Image (cartoon, rainbow, N blue to C red):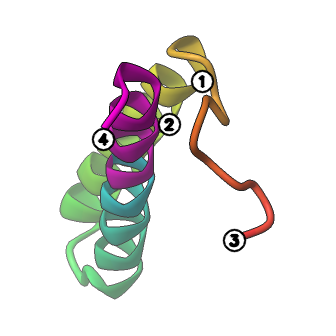
């Protein structure tokens, strides 16, 4: 696999993790825990954007 493909896989994994955090935040009953999860997801999404957003190997339509 190419280095570009590996970067795309990493970004895809990070996006999936950020979505999991958002989902967990929606289910959280404790407001502090909800905020903590939302903030973690937001930071992860910012990191993805800084790394190139929809980099090589990612299909934004999926």
Residue at point 32% right, 70% down?
20
Residue for point 80% across, 65% down: 61
Question: Relative to 53, is 13 above or below?
Answer: below
From mark 3 to mark 2, how far is it between C-alphas?
A: 17 Å
Residue 59 sits inside the magenta stretch:
no
Q: Position of residue 54 (x, y in %)?
A: 67, 36
Q: Residue at x 50, y 15 (%)?
A: 51
Q: Residue furthest right?
A: 61
Question: Which residue bears the numbered disc 3?
Answer: 62
**Residue positioned most to the front:** 1
Residue 22 or 12: which is nearer the viewer?
A: 12
Q: Which residue is mark 4?
A: 40
Disc 4 element? helix
Tell me where residue 44 sits by quadrant: top left
Q: CA distance from mark 1 to mark 2?
A: 6 Å
Estimate the spatial distance between the alpha carbons at disc 1 and disc 4, rounded to whole Å: 14 Å
Mark positioned earlier in the residue sequence (2 or 4): 4
Task: From this view, report whether residue 41 is shown above or below residue 21.
Answer: above
Instruction: Look at mark 1 in the image and give the residue it sits on.
Output: 49
Find disc 2 in the rendering and name its residue.
Answer: 45
**Mark 3, mark 4: which one is toward the viewer?**
3
Q: How far apart are the alpha carbons under marks 3 and 1?
A: 17 Å
Front residue of 21 and 6: 6
Label 1: state its secondary structure.
helix
> Is 38 placed above or below 57 here?
below
- The range drawn in magenta is 1-13
């Amino acid at each position: 696999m190419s280095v570009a493909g590996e970067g795309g896989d990493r970004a895809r994994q990070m996006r999936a993790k950020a979505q999991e955090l958002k989902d967990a935040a929606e289910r959280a009953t404790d407001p502090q825990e909800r905020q903590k999860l939302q903030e973690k997801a937001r930071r992860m999404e910012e990191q993805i954007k800084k790394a190139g957003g929809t980099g090589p190997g990612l299909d934004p339509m999926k």
